[in-house]
Amino acid sequence: MSYAGDIDPLEAWEKLKDGAVLVDVRTEEEWAHIGIPDTKATENDPLFIPWVFAGGIPNPDFVMELTLQAPEPGSTELVFLCRSGNRSVAAAEVAANLGFTAYNILEGFEGHPGPDGHRTVNGWKNRGLPTNLGQD
């Protein structure tokens, strides 16, 4: 089974306002230093489940953590977020195989690098969506 599709950050925000749950699959370091989505204006808190740990080490407990933390499959949509929209594709595919309706957020939290190499072009935070910025 394949995930439900790719959506941009603004479409994801609309889904969250309609009751979907955000699953942020970045690392703890990314959450702490770059920031996290602020979903207080929606009815659901985000889930923070790393797809990989620092150094690219896969999270062997991803499936268990997702099934323990997410609502029952089929009860609500899940939207997956990573840095640029790559890790979240793999996580959305796994979730779909578990029976969840899962979407991947294109552009991710930080977006793609611009001409200067900095991630200021697009993505969740650069599109002005609610964010709690990290410590750096």
Image (tube, rainbow, N blue to C red):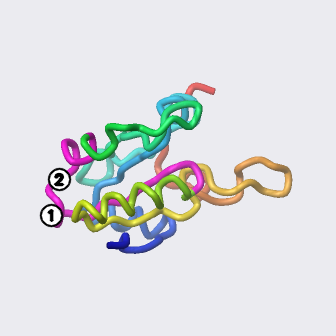
Relative to 82, is 27 above or below?
above
> Amino acid under label 1?
Ser
Taking 100 as reference, is 109 left or right? right
Which SS class for mark 1? Answer: loop
Q: What is the x, y in percent for residue 98?
A: 24, 60
Q: Quadrant of the C terminus?
A: top right
Task: Please name the residue shown 34% across and 42% down the image.
Answer: 62
In the image, 97 versus 29, the foreground residue is 97
- Where is residue 83 shown, x and y percent of the image? 57, 49
Quarter occupied by residue 100: bottom left
Q: Amino acid at mark 2?
A: Pro
Residue identified by numbered label 2:
71
Q: What is the x, y in percent for residue 25? A: 43, 45
Which region of the structure is painted magenta?
65-84
Neighbor class of circle 1 (other Cα within 10 Å; few <14, some 14-19, many 20+) is few
Q: Are marks 2 and 1 in contact (CB under 8 Å)?
A: yes
